[in-house]
Image (cartoon, rainbow, N blue to C red):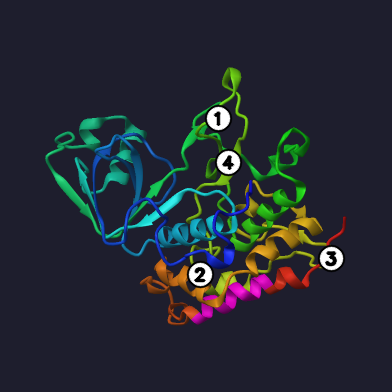
Amino acid sequence: MWAPPAVPVSGADLSSNPAGGFGPDDEVSCRFNPKMIGGTTPKFNCDLPSGETIKVKYGQGNPELNADVASTRLLTALGFPADRMFVVRRVRCAGCPTFPFQALRCLDRIDVKTACFPGGLNYNRIVDFDAAVVERRIDGRVIEATEDQGWGWYELTRIDPARGGSSPAEVDALRLMAVFLAHWDNKDANQRLICPAGKDGDGGSCTAPIAIMQDLGATFGPTKVDLHNWRQGRIWKEGASCLVSMEHLPWGGGTFPESRISEGGRQQLLGLLQQLSDSQIRDLFESSGITRLDQVNAEARRVEAWIAAFKDRVKQIREAGPCPS
């Protein structure tokens, strides 16, 4: 669930796309892949000329794009594995209908291709998406018994460090990080188990599986990039006993049960977050476009307000405890 980041936290670049991918001024050309895709935010799969399939999330004013970018950059900087999200200038999709997500949902519901894709898929037709981000998943095999099985937060008690699993402190640090972000849309499908490339064992086993949060569009809220509610939301249900809960958030907390954070977990996440400078936090919110969203109020356009809210949540972690053993 966690590994020391390749770049020290204090040196992490939160102003740019991840290395080795697309730049913010790139036009990405791909071919529409009509595989059904879940969730509620507009998205579709698209095949690059190399054969790699990327996920494109789109929509002018869609806060999930910005939340996803900011959350994954922050997690990666702190050492928690996450998919890579790229802000790009434009996605040029060959074969896309004008509204690809709606067409795919139509197909899933009525299973009549001629009704959902009138005229069929025309790969000579290009549709441009200017408000879009590209998701590239962590390389590796998804571990699941059924499609989109994922994992629920209530299952984290089954992690066994004696068998190579994360330590209790690392598990609690991830729990606390989910609360920090207000990751309330935490149904099983929004987390993923992965066997990284090169880590397959005998008989379909995995020598070094990782567990990640994979869909982070409903963060910094709870109503998705909502400064007021993110700032008002408390980290602790009971600070003295280090009790956390998401029961007050949408879905009553989802798969996240009320939990007590260990002192090791509190100290681990606190030690990571405190290494971030104000300029890095500024870069996080500005480069993800959170401060430029059309629907945010005037205060939420001020990056200083987001920096203050971020640092206040760090302060709440610092001032709690010491947590019970």
Mark 1–mark 4 Cα distance, whole angstroms, equals 11 Å
* SS of the residue under disc 4: helix
Query: What residue span does the magenta drawing correspond to?
Result: 304-314
Q: Earlier in the sequence, mark 2 or mark 4?
A: 4
Mark 2–mark 4 Cα distance, whole angstroms, equals 24 Å
Indicate the position of residue 295 as horizontal and vertical percent values: 39, 71
- Whether the magenta-drawn stretch holds residue 225 is answered as no
Mark 3–mark 4 Cα distance, whole angstroms, equals 31 Å
* SS of the residue under disc 3: loop
Give the residue displayed 63% in from the left and 42% down from the top.
152
Give the residue displayed 66% in from the left and 70% down from the top.
314
Q: Do the CB atoms of the residues marked 1 and 4 lie less than 8 Å apart?
A: no
Q: Amino acid at mark 3?
A: Pro
Q: Earlier in the sequence, mark 3 or mark 1?
A: 1
Residue under label 1, please give it.
144
Q: Earlier in the sequence, mark 1 or mark 4?
A: 1
Indicate the position of residue 15 as horizontal and vertical percent values: 43, 67
Q: Amino acid at mark 4?
A: Asp
Residue under label 4, please give it.
188
Q: Nearer the viewer, mark 3 or mark 1?
A: 3
Residue 79 visible in the snapshot: yes
Dividing the picture into quadrants, the one containing residue 278 is: bottom right
Mark 1–mark 2 Cα distance, whole angstroms, equals 33 Å
